[in-house]
Image: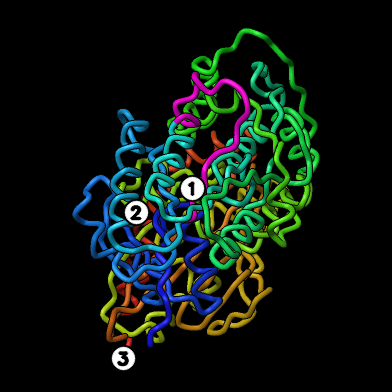
Amino acid sequence: MSPPTTLVTGASGYIGGRLARQLAHRGVAVRCMGRRPEALAQRFNGDIETIYGDVSDAESLDSALQGIETAYYLIHALDESGDFESMEIRGARNFAESARKAGVQRIVYLGGLSHGDTSGSAHMRSRHAVGDLLRQSDIPTIEFQASVVIGAGSLSFEMVRALVRRLPIMIAPRWVRMKSQPIAVDDVLAYLEEARVIPLTEHRTYEIGGADVISYREFMLRYAASQGLSRRIINVPFLTPWLSSLWLNLVTPLLARVGRKLIASICVASVVEDEQARRDFRVVPMGIDEAIEAAHREEEAQVVSTHWSDALSASGTPQHWGGKHFGTRIVDERKAMISQPPEVAFIPIQRIGGQTGWYYANGLWKLRGIIDKLVGGVGSDRGRRHPEHLYVGDTLDWWRVETIEAGTCLVLAAEMKLPGRAWLRFDLEPDDNGESCTLRQTAIFDPHGVAGLAYWYALYPLHEFIFAGMCRNLAQAAERLPT
């Protein structure tokens, strides 16, 4: 007899993707439902079953819910254009009815926590309405009402980080003084995982938050302190949520589209009043400083497994001029197909730099090294230790090897003088039979303030020229090698 299957919806998003991997790692049979199952399959490398399903299309849910014992409802339309509130309500109604017909035994839903008048927040109204509709299925439902989620890649964390990093002085509207109880993403996942197995015969609603009750203002100051930054926040009483969204748009345009909807929900308190979750679950939530530190550790290790904007990228959104923005980081990605197995295609990658050069516009790379030397940087005189082999910690011109996995991945961290931090990453993704692969070349820049942004965009036309040529020539160099 096959083990019961657990369905995770919203697996292309921030929480859903992490939960699916965590459950699968525990040996749970996981099925992920999405509008683009082929994109989900690539994300999970075939380790998790993926299937087409769209909550706006009720008929598509029948096969997705077939044989499911526990269903996680982690879908939200915050990043959709148009009337996202109506979209969420219609989707929840379809899902509840289809889950009832399929014989699902348990639904677990992650919503939002708020106390007070939510009439001004379509986001929070829809979160509560979705919970009500799922309970109407008569399937025992656990609804978690969560405060602000903190983790590497979460929308709230990225918004705060962008504001603090880019604005030494902030004119802050009234909503930054509203109290919340931020909860670490790892604690949210622990609650969700345990909700699959705790005894349940009726609907339950749990309020969950971290160990500290703070305002967004204090959150910003705590983050600044964690980065050794001095920030001044000037409170003003007259910035409405709409004006705040315009202010946010000036600082971080990508976050503004979804952030403006989030800001409206911040205008009501998000503090745990019912402590039943502490009694029914084994989770001991961490405090805000520990949550921020955990997010930093994850980012520094370059293992941010999901990002709130993954749901956007899963829709096939192309890279715009200047690169994609992920929080404060800017990513320039290039791809090339190579008709060689990864172990062969990796040879030119591990020879990069030093006497070999950078496969394109070597004169410009040398000029950049000279400029770096003139401003007190390391320059490019260091070369490399060995012409063929690289190891973690090796110097490579003005880079240092941060990660190397033969035939798979090379990550270089920049040690030149920059108004920010930079990485250059090369990944090889094999095809189904392993006889060819895709080269994914990624330049990542984490700008420090306005100077960092000015640096990136001033040089981007040149970078676009250089990075495109380097990716193309690396692929051609691999093609010329004997198999």
Q: Are marks 1 and 2 in contact (CB under 8 Å)?
A: no
In magenta, the rendered stretch is 108-125
The amino acid pointed to by label 3 is Pro
N-terminal-most mark, 3 or 1:
1
Q: Position of residue 258 (x, y in %)?
A: 45, 33
How far separated are the C-alphas under marks 3 and 1? 42 Å
The Cα–Cα distance between marks 3 and 2, rounded to whole angstroms, is 36 Å
Q: Secondary structure at mark 1?
A: loop
Instruction: Answer with left or right where residue 213 lies relative to residue 51.
Output: right
Check disc 3 and report the residue beneath it: 482
What residue is disc 1 on?
A: 308
- Look at the image and say whether residue 110 sits in the magenta stretch: yes
Q: Quadrant of the C terminus?
A: bottom left
Quarter of the picture holding the N terminus? bottom left
Which numbered dot is residue 291?
none
Q: Residues within 10 Å of mark 1 (few under 14, many from 20)?
A: many
Q: Nearer the viewer, residue 179 or 118?
A: 118
Q: Nearer the viewer, residue 170 or 82?
A: 82
Q: Is residue 324 above or below residue 239?
A: below
Image position of 174 with respect to 190: above or below:
above
Ranked by sequence position, the earlier of labels 1 and 2 is: 1
